[in-house]
Amino acid sequence: MVKALKGKPITPRVHIEEGGKIHYAVSCRHCEDPLCIKGCISGALTKSEDGIVTIDHNKCVGCLSCMLLCPYGCITTDENSTVLKCELCIQNGGIPACVEGCPNRAIVFEEVQA
Ligand code: SF4
Ligand code: SF4
């Protein structure tokens, strides 16, 4: 996988933070009261009935307000300034690709009561 991707632009929706011996995946928390949605000037960000925060790329104007507002740093851009975030792979049947593809089973997908 590493060889196949070498030199190719990668635009992940989840990124890995490294701090000493600790590595952790940073992805959208699909917040109860999302600041990114509050700050979106075009209505491109919405939350579905089942709590998933998604981006409508046809409505997004690329102002990047959501990037500044997300307290977890979960929104990124690609080389075309398209905003990207984890949308729980709802287009792919709802099984997150990161969970399926992690060789060490370090990522789990489960509901946790707050
Ligand atoms: S992008 Fe950030 S603010 Fe928006 S729902 Fe995800 S974690 Fe919350
Ligand atoms: S970059 Fe797009 S999704 Fe983000 S706040 Fe601006 S219009 Fe909304």
Image (cartoon, rainbow, N blue to C red):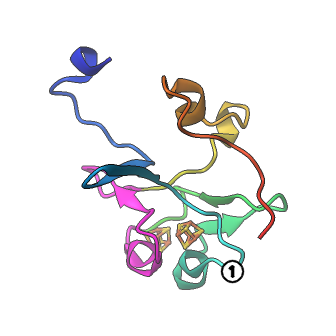
Q: Which residues are magenta?
A: 62-83
Q: Nearer the viewer, residue 38 or 27?
A: 27
Q: Nearer the viewer, residue 37 or 103?
A: 103
Q: Does residue 75 show up magenta in the picture?
A: yes
Vertical comparison of 17 with 109: above or below: below
The location of residue 87, given as percent across then percent down, is 60, 50
Vertical comparison of 99 with 66: above or below: above
Q: Residue at x 37, y 59 (%)?
A: 76
| In the image: residue 61, left or right of residue 49 | left
Q: Nearer the viewer, residue 21 or 113?
A: 21
Q: Residue furthest front?
A: 21
| In the image: residue 83, left or right of residue 37 | left
The quadrant in which residue 56 appears is: bottom right
Which residue is denoted by mark 1 in the rendering?
33
- Name which residue type carries label 1: Asp
Query: Secondary structure beneath disc 1?
Result: loop
Quarter of the image containing the C terminus? bottom right
The location of residue 83, given as percent across then percent down, is 41, 59
The quadrant in which residue 17 appears is: bottom left
Quarter of the image containing the N terminus? top left
Q: Residue at x 42, y 51 (%)?
A: 24
Badge count? 1
Q: Residue at x 60, y 63 (%)?
A: 29
Q: Does residue 89 show up magenta in the picture?
A: no
